[in-house]
Image (cartoon, grey):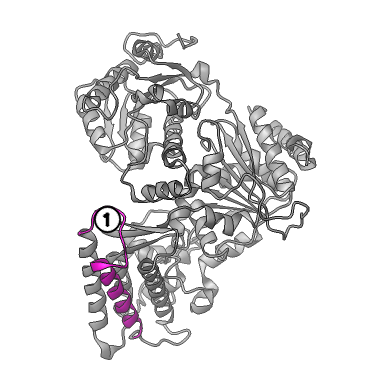
């Protein structure tokens, strides 16, 4: 096979990309974007898998959309964030439909819980959806449910995101179902009016379906039974795919699931049976919750002792309750409700039985604070290989896929192999299994990091495992944020460090926002709008935050974000790697730290006009051998270990009072 640039589809893709960019005001022709587009086109044409690490500013959305669309292949794009979904469906795809010169149809497909369930809405508001004919069995949940009914009657889409006014989760639960509750179109009396099914029908007709990682992972876990058939899949923000797969192929065991079943089933019992079956389910829920609360936050054996007994009792209680549900014929008011409760019960029993008899390669652990037992595959490579990689070309892309420039750690965890082991090398028919080999490409972003920013590693600080480190690091952050005049995002690896840093910044002249003070979305908005504020946050803020301009001149990271040594799933993965003779640190801990560190550092430079400092207060980044591998995963900023240089740099940006912020080349 020739190179990507020699592929006929690659040539066509590059030509189409050039035309598109000429139609977009102020667009630039980026070498990295062109390289990626050519590689994607060749991979689609030759039915190959491709991993692309594309730096911020590459324009990777067009780099995969253009070649996919001109290939005439059906495409699913799965993203980790709603922000990117909105960008694709609201900006990129409409623009391509107007200018690409080929038919472009698309839709966004969400999980069932994002859509109104007509069966539940009619049960609560009556067949006329006027709110006055509430079925006695399901009294409506208040005026908000009627408002949803009025919205549907007035032509509303049924998609929660399109509601003219937001409703809270309690109300939405009254008019929607999860995938585990839905009995399916054929068993639902409102199947012909199902909004989720209509969205799926629209997806079947579209060339491009935009969805999220979780739904795509559930699609794979279901044996390809959720999404429409498609020729190619692009996983954007692919550094988060492993977590989505682990969640989709795993289950939760908790008393809350039993109580949710009981709440839905409580009025569907045969009149003569009274409340005894539901009382038994509730008692099983209390017993299970009490047992989980008493467990250590660690790996556990789910089949033994009090926990095994509580799970077994729960499955029996649910099974007995299902046997006492009313009989409802097709079309009767209760038919949909009974079908939903039976579907919910089937999932509860199935998941709890899986926990009682763990399959090989699965691990269970308790999270007593959340009163849940989590069951998940130790590694997702086999699941992805069996359910995706042999079936269709898969494009994985993100700004952070490598460790020290190598794709191998991620590729191995996702089931890719270095050499073909399944397919006949002469086979090329679209129905043949694909080999699990992969192509890899790294492309630089469009930003000139060497002139836009500085990476400062505080190598003079104590080792983070030293007791003196916490206060020393917090004092260093005070010095840096004073120099920057606020305008800082401080990322910590623990709530304890968050509190220590906050205590060191109590009397600073700029506003200090702390995670937990406000909802996340509002907190980020306050930080963005108040130019001189500083935001202190933990792990949930290390990625997905986009604050360009002067509101963010400093990103301070307290320490290398290695996973906790006692994290049960990570422990199990280390054990699995060690059993194969590998290095747990290299295969598990280092890739996790590299991805998060790169994501955190990537919050700084989001546009060509951004300037600032990334400060890492962990001396191991320069003092340990693995530090060089981590450094190679970070944006190529100028580097220093001189704190005075970092302070001068920040002051030169105009952060400190009385310092000019005029145009200049920063770096000295």
Q: Nearer the viewer, residue 233 or 524?
A: 233
Give above or below for 262 relative to 456.
Answer: below
Instruction: Look at 52% across and 52% down and name the residue there.
Output: 381
Residue 601 shows up from this direction: yes
Query: Would residue 8 be found to the left or right of residue 511 on screen?
Result: right
Q: Where residue 101 sits: x, y (%)?
A: 75, 44
Does residue 293 show up magenta in the picture? no
User: Does 335 sit left or right of 312 as displayed?
Assistant: right
Q: Which residues are magenta?
A: 294-323
Q: Is residue 314 magenta?
A: yes
Total numbered labels: 1
Residue position for label 1: 370
Say few, some or many: other residues with alpha carbon within 10 Å of mark 1 (under 14 / 14 to 19 / 20 or more). few
Q: Note whether residue 237 is visible.
A: no
Give coordinates of residue 634: x percent, y percent. 48, 28
Q: Main secondary structure of the magenta part?
A: helix
Q: Nearer the viewer, residue 378 or 499?
A: 378
Quarter of the picture containing the N terminus is: top right
The picture quadrant where one finds residue 181 is bottom left
Q: Quadrant of residue 321?
A: bottom left
Which one is nearer the viewer's eye here, 496 or 666? Answer: 496
Residue located 31% across and 84% down the image: 269
């Amino acid at each position: 096979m020739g190179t990507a640039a020699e592929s006929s589809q690659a040539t066509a893709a590059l030509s189409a990309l050039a035309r598109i960019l000429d139609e977009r005001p102020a667009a630039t022709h980026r070498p990295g974007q062109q390289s990626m587009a050519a590689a994607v086109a060749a991979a689609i044409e030759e039915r190959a898998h491709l991993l692309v690490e594309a730096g911020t500013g590459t324009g990777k959305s067009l780099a995969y959309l253009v070649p996919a669309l001109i290939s005439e292949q059906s495409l699913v794009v799965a993203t980790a964030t709603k922000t990117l979904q909105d960008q694709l469906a609201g900006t990129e795809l409409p623009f391509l439909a107007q200018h690409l010169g080929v038919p472009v149809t698309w839709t966004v497909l969400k999980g069932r819980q994002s859509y109104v369930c007509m069966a539940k809405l009619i049960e609560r508001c009556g067949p006329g959806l006027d709110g006055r004919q509430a079925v006695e069995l399901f009294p409506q949940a208040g005026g908000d449910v009627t408002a949803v009914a009025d919205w549907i009657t007035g032509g509303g889409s049924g998609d929660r995101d399109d509601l003219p006014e937001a409703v809270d989760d309690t109300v939405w639960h009254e008019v929607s179902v999860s995938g585990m509750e839905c009995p399916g179109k054929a068993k639902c009396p409102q199947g012909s009016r199902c909004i989720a099914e209509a969205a799926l029908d629209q997806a079947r007709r579209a060339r491009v379906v935009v969805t999220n990682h979780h739904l795509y992972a559930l699609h794979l876990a279901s044996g390809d039974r959720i999404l429409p058939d498609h020729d190619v899949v692009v996983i954007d923000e692919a550094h988060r795919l492993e977590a989505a797969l682990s969640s989709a192929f795993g289950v939760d065991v908790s008393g809350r699931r039993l109580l949710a079943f009981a709440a839905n089933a409580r009025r569907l019992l045969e009149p003569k049976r009274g409340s005894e079956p539901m009382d038994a389910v509730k008692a099983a829920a209390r017993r299970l919750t009490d047992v989980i609360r008493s467990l250590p936050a660690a790996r556990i054996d789910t089949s033994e002792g009090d926990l095994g007994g509580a799970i077994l009792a729960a499955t029996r209680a649910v099974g007995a309750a299902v046997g006492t549900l009313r009989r409802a014929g097709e079309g009767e008011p209760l038919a949909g409700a009974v079908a939903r409760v039976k579907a919910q019960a089937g999932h509860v029993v199935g998941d709890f039985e899986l926990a009682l008899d763990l399959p090989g390669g699965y691990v269970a652990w308790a999270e007593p604070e959340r009163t849940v037992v989590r069951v998940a595959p130790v590694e997702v490579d086999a699941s992805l290989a069996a359910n995706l990689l042999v079936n269709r070309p898969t494009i994985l892309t993100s700004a952070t896929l490598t460790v020290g420039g190598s794709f191998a750690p991620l590729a191995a965890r996702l089931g890719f192999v270095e050499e073909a082991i399944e397919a006949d090398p002469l086979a090329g028919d679209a129905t043949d299994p694909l080999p699990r080999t992969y192509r890899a490409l790294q492309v630089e972003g469009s930003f000139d990091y060497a002139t836009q920013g500085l990476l400062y590693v505080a190598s003079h600080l104590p080792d983070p495992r030293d007791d003196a480190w916490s206060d020393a690091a917090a004092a260093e952050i005070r010095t840096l944020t004073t120099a920057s005049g606020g305008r800082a995002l401080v990322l910590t690896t623990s709530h304890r460090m968050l509190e220590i840093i906050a205590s060191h910044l109590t009397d600073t002249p700029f506003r200090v926002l702390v995670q937990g003070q406000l909802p996340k979305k509002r907190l980020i908005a306050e930080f963005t709008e108040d130019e001189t504020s500083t935001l202190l946050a933990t792990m949930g803020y290390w990625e997905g935050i986009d604050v360009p301009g002067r509101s963010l001149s400093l990103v301070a990271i307290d320490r290398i974000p290695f996973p906790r040594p006692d994290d049960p799933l990570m422990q199990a993965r280390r054990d699995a790697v060690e059993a194969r003779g590998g290095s747990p640190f290299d295969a598990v801990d280092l890739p996790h730290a590299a991805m998060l560190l790169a994501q955190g550092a990537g919050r700084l430079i989001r546009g060509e006009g951004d300037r600032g400092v990334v400060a890492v207060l962990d001396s191991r980044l320069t003092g340990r051998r693995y530090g060089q591998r981590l450094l190679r995963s970070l944006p190529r900023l100028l580097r220093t270990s001189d704190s005075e240089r970092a302070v001068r740099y920040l002051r030169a940006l105009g952060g400190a009072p009385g310092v000019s912020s005029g145009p200049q080349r920063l770096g000295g």
